[in-house]
Image: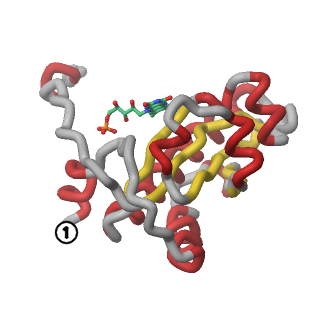
Amino acid sequence: MSVTDLIRSRRNIKSFKPDDIAESELLYWLEAASYAPNHRMTEPWELKLVGPDTRARLNHKTDFGHAPVVLAVLSKKGASAMERDENMMASACYVQNFLLAAHEAGVGAYWASLGALPQNREILGVSEEYDVIGVFGIGYPEEVPAAKPRTPITAKLTRLV
Ligand SMILES: Cc1cc2nc3c(=O)[nH]c(=O)nc-3n(C[C@H](O)[C@H](O)[C@H](O)COP(=O)(O)O)c2cc1C
């Protein structure tokens, strides 16, 4: 599939098959994602593979769609407000790279925001130096939802003189 087709066909997945993902495959996509743009090579992303006890304590409403893997992605705040913003942007690029690499192999992800809540930061052992980008259920999709329509990009495009 072309990169453009991968981008268009990736969906946020909410239910997964129980089939495991080989850790070597997971690491392959996570490694590839590191080639994301990041200003001054801060490589701000940090990853936490969430084990069963921690996962249960997060108490997600659908247990991440019963995904076989749960991964938290953090972003280092850095030394200034600007660096924090830039690092979060870089970490979001990292996530999208990962999502596309996994999607190419037929693996989907459920992006959940709950990791940013104070009690969940504590459960995940996130220090004050990090933002939580998301907690991701990862696995082979049981169901792939239809794409939600997007606004034509020309409606968001302004031409400056
Ligand atoms: C920063 C961020 C946080 C998100 N948090 C959640 C979430 O907590 N729960 C959820 O169901 N989806 C979450 N999503 C996924 C979006 O809901 C999803 O990407 C959007 O509905 C578009 O669907 P698509 O990804 O299938 O195209 C999040 C996405 C982003 C970028």
The percent coordinates of residue 57 (x first, y second) are 74, 37
Q: Position of residue 20 (x, y in %)?
A: 50, 69
Residue 111 % position (x, y): 48, 40
| Residue 78 placement: quadrant | top right
Q: Amino acid at mark 1?
A: Met
Q: Is residue 47 visible?
A: no
Viewer-closest of 92 and 30: 30
Residue drawn at x 56%, y 65% is: 30
Residue displayed at 75% across by 45% down: 54
Q: Is residue 71 left or right of residue 35?
A: right
| Location of residue 146 in the rendering, given as x and y in whole percent from the top left corner | 18, 39
Residue annotated with mark 1: 1
The kind of secondary structure element at disc 1 is loop
Q: How many marks?
A: 1
Q: Nearer the viewer, residue 146 or 51?
A: 51
Q: Quadrant of ligand 1?
A: top left
Residue count near mark 1 (Cα–Cα under 10 Å), binned few <14, some 14–19, many ≥20: few
